[in-house]
Image (cartoon, coloured by chain):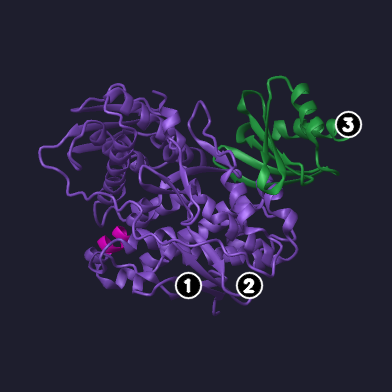
């Protein structure tokens, strides 16, 4: 999985994580179910027939956003915990990527 | 009464605006907010900058809430306070509780205010003794207080007495009745607005209208605890566009009054730079987001499509309607701006009341977008937005320049902007 830091912004760091295939609804759901305390929101965008996914991590330590259109997932993590959280985010994404 | 339910933006697609309480609101990020405010604040030794930063917000909030209370028929003070609290959060300014305010004034304190919170998280601490950064909220709440109690505009004074940027745990403002009212003017509201339609440019698959509608449907929801809006990796606000336009104009006027006409190019350059910073952070952040990937990326075939995609999104963030007048290239981009918010606000002033003869924000913004596409090549590589990249790209000056070939503020019927490489 590729990872690039995009922006350090206020209290967040934004990373780009690239998976091999766009994650579907079942993979996002699995991610949320496995990650105790996280919350998944699903936003259909009718005008372009797309779906946005937003997973809020426990204790609001970060947000993962992605869409059904792209292999790119954005991890926007709490700056003071970003380096610790990033490997966990990547591992968990890796685990659902092949479901 | 459900205050939250009464508070919603009305998108006016034929104007490219988001209206609430008769005020067009625009989406901006904390980088732009701080850059513009700090640039003005730097003049504090030259003129009293609170008269621009605080008073302008007070004028706008007074008109906004008077209009909102009239439209909703709410007369009860407690319900009016609930509406102000809901609007404040809905717009991403933070969280407030107005319970302790009366018609005589009082105190408001919060740990969550957009300018203070994002400043403290982003920038080095301010020198001890420097006043707080929550100018906008200070004026906004003073104007809101006047509207809640049906007081005349300018009858409430205000002061920020604590700030997160000074190591305080909360932002605190004091409000009090004034014996002599401040010389404030009601807001210009929707200004000299124009109507138009989003023109689908033929040489692209980017579906302008669908993208605008998609961005309008995106969930910019304030955090339930902080009332701050995180989106695209930055912190966003919905702020009355008149605020940005008027503080820019008034700052220019005050600087010329104080220092003479020679200062004009310097002030203008700072206002242009604020647009450039906005392109880099806000629009750059949008172009590298899940929202962009879902809504725009599937239609992108060429570098120019990045320009079309961002233009299609602008009406949905309240900036007006932007149309290409020819196919853009790295050598030239020509656009027509309909109801561009800065022009619309300033056009509502008489020529004698204004100095700016075009929108400097637009000049910086469109030049910055061109640089993102053709210099930074955002279409073929992901960018890491930081000071290093900004210096690498623009260390020797802006790569593109934008000029208004037609300007409503000069009496032309429309705004037309031409972006070309800067002369070296």
Q: Where is the C terminus of chain A found, in terms of image quarters? A: top right
Do the residues at pointers 3 and 2 share their chain?
no
Name the residue nearer the viewer: B46 or A76: A76
SS at circle 3: loop
Residue B253 within the segment the image draws in magenta: yes
Q: Residue at x 20, y 37 (%)?
A: B156
Residue drawn at x 27%, y 37% as measured from the top left: B142
- Secondary-structure class at tag 2: loop
Chain identifier, colour green: A
Quadrant in which the N terminus of chain A appears: top right
Q: Residue B183: x, y in percent?
A: 17, 49
Q: Which residues are magenta?
A: B249-255
Q: For mark 2, name the chain.
A: B
Q: Is residue B249 depicted above or below A94 in this figure?
A: below
**Residue lying at 58% horizontally and 42% vertically, measured from the top left:** B231
- Residue bearing mark 3: A99
Residue bearing the label numbered 1 = B416
Name, please, the residue furthest toward the right.
A98
Chain B: colour as depicted? purple
């Amino acid at each position: 999985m590729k990872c690039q830091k995009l922006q350090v912004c206020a209290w967040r760091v934004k990373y780009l994580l690239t998976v091999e295939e766009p994650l579907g609804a079942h993979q996002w759901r699995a991610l949320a179910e496995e990650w105790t305390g996280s919350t998944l929101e699903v936003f259909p965008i009718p005008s372009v027939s797309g779906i946005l996914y937003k997973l809020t991590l426990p204790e609001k330590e970060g947000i993962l956003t992605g869409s059904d259109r792209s292999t790119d997932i954005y991890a926007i993590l709490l700056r003071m915990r970003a380096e610790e959280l990033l490997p966990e985010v990547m591992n968990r994404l890796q685990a659902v990527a092949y479901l | 009464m459900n205050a939250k339910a009464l508070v919603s933006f009305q998108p006016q697609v034929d104007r490219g605006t988001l209206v609430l309480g008769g005020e067009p609101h625009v989406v901006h990020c904390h980088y732009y907010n701080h850059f513009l405010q700090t640039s003005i604040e730097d003049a504090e030794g030259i003129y009293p900058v609170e008269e621009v930063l605080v008073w302008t917000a007070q004028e706008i909030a007074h008109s906004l809430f008077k209009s909102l209370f009239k439209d909703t028929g709410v007369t009860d003070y407690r319900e009016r306070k609930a509406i102000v609290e809901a609007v404040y959060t809905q717009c991403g300014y933070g969280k407030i509780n107005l319970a302790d305010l009366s018609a005589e004034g009082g105190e408001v304190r919060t740990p969550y205010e957009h300018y203070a919170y994002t400043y403290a998280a982003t920038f080095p601490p301010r020198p001890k003794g420097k006043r707080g950064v929550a100018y906008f909220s200070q004026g906004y709440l003073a104007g809101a207080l006047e509207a809640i109690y049906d007081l005349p505009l300018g009858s409430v004074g205000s002061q920020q007495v604590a700030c997160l940027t000074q190591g305080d745990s909360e932002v605190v403002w004091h409000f009090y009745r004034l014996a002599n009212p401040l010389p404030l003017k009601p807001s210009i509201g929707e200004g000299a607005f124009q109507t138009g339609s989003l023109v689908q440019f033929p040489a692209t698959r980017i579906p302008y209208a669908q993208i605008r509608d998609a961005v309008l449907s995106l969930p910019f929801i304030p955090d339930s605890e902080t009332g701050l809006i995180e989106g695209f990796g930055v912190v966003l606000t919905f702020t009355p566009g008149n605020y940005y336009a008027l503080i820019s104009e008034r700052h220019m006027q005050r600087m010329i009054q104080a220092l003479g006409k020679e200062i004009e190019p310097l002030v203008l350059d700072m206002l242009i730079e604020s647009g450039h910073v906005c392109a880099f952070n806000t629009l750059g952040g949008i172009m590298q987001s899940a929202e962009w990937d879902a809504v725009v990326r599937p239609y992108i075939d060429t570098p120019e499509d990045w320009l079309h995609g961002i233009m299609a999104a602008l009406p949905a963030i309240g900036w007006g309607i932007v149309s290409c007048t020819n196919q853009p290239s790295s050598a030239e981009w020509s656009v027509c701006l309909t109801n561009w918010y800065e022009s619309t606000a300033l056009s509502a002033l008489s020529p004698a009341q204004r100095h700016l003869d075009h929108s400097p924000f637009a000049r910086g913004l469109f030049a910055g977008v061109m640089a993102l596409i053709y210099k930074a090549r955002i279409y073929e590589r992901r960018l890491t937005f930081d000071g290093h990249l900004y210096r690498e790209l623009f260390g020797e000056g802006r790569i593109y320049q934008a000029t208004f070939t037609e300007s409503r503020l000069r009496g032309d019927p429309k705004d037309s902007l031409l972006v070309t490489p800067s002369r070296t």
